[in-house]
């Protein structure tokens, strides 16, 4: 190979390296921060009757319902579902029964499926909670024979069945205990992200 050819190859190699290094850089867009889940100050579920789906999961009946966000709103706002077993001094709002509206728009509706009532005979109160764990809409569910809810009806949020303190655990990022699965009536697979559950 002649000196000229070697120099030409060397120049071509240098140009190729410079072009590769000087290739247009793409801007790295930082991820958008999603607000952490928190109770929405205003939630409506007027006359909403959660209905048993006819299915159970881990021995708990799946209830389906909906809630609507009203003003004022907050980023990451959502609601909880609490269960009040008859004869117990408190109700329970487990971290897997929290849901987010996924929007700050007033009027955003959120349908859901939740594990709220044990599939064991008894009487249970179930409420949608908003604000500072305020009972927004409640109902009585009676389970007979351990097979399914045999009756359910709306009750007042100050009914003795549900007029108790509630023990709430932090959101788990899941919609069922230890399983990120989907429940009937709940169109969102992963509720952990602030805008999708």
Image (cartoon, rainbow, N blue to C red):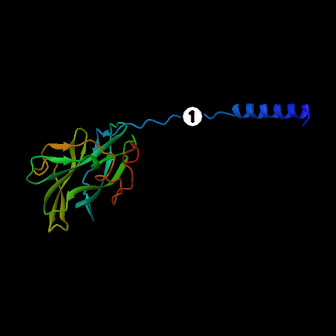
In this rendering, position of residue 52 left or right of residue 110: left
Q: Position of residue 72 (x, y in %)?
A: 32, 36
Q: Position of residue 124 (x, y in %)?
A: 15, 56
Picture layout, residue 41 above or below residue 121: above
Q: Position of residue 18 (x, y in %)?
A: 74, 30
Residue nearest the observer in this picture, 14 or 121: 14
Residue 69: quarter of image: top left
Residue nearest the observer in this picture, 153 or 33: 33
Q: Residue furthest front?
A: 1
Residue nearest the observer in this picture, 10 or 91: 10
Q: Position of residue 41 (x, y in %)?
A: 28, 38
Secondary structure state at the residue bearing disc 1? loop
Judging by the rendered image, the residue that carries numbered circle 1 is: 28
Picture layout, residue 165 above or below residue 51: above
Residue nearest the observer in this picture, 129 or 90: 90
Q: Quadrant of the N terminus?
A: top right
Picture layout, residue 103 above or below residue 25: below
In this rendering, position of residue 85 left or right of residue 27: left
Q: What's the residue at 23%, 43% (across, down)?
A: 169
């Amino acid at each position: 190979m002649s000196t000229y050819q070697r120099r030409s190859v060397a120049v071509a190699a240098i140009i190729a390296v410079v072009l590769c290094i000087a290739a247009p850089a793409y801007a790295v867009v930082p991820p958008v921060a999603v607000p952490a889940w928190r109770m929405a100050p205003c939630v409506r579920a007027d006359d909403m009757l959660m209905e048993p789906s006819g299915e159970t999961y881990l021995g708990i009946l799946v209830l389906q319902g909906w809630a609507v966000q009203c003003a004022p709103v907050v980023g990451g706002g959502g609601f909880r579902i609490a269960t009040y077993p008859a004869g117990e001094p408190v109700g329970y709002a487990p971290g897997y029964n929290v849901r987010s509206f996924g929007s700050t728009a007033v009027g955003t509706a959120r349908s859901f499926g939740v594990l709220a009532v044990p599939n064991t005979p008894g009487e249970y109160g179930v409420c949608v909670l908003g604000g500072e764990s305020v009972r927004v809409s409640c109902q009585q569910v009676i389970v007979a024979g351990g097979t399914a809810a045999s009756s359910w009806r709306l009750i007042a949020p100050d009914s003795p069945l549900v007029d108790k303190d509630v023990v709430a655990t932090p959101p788990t990022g899941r919609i069922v205990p230890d399983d990120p699965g989907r429940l009937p009536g709940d169109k969102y697979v992963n509720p952990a992200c602030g805008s999708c559950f």
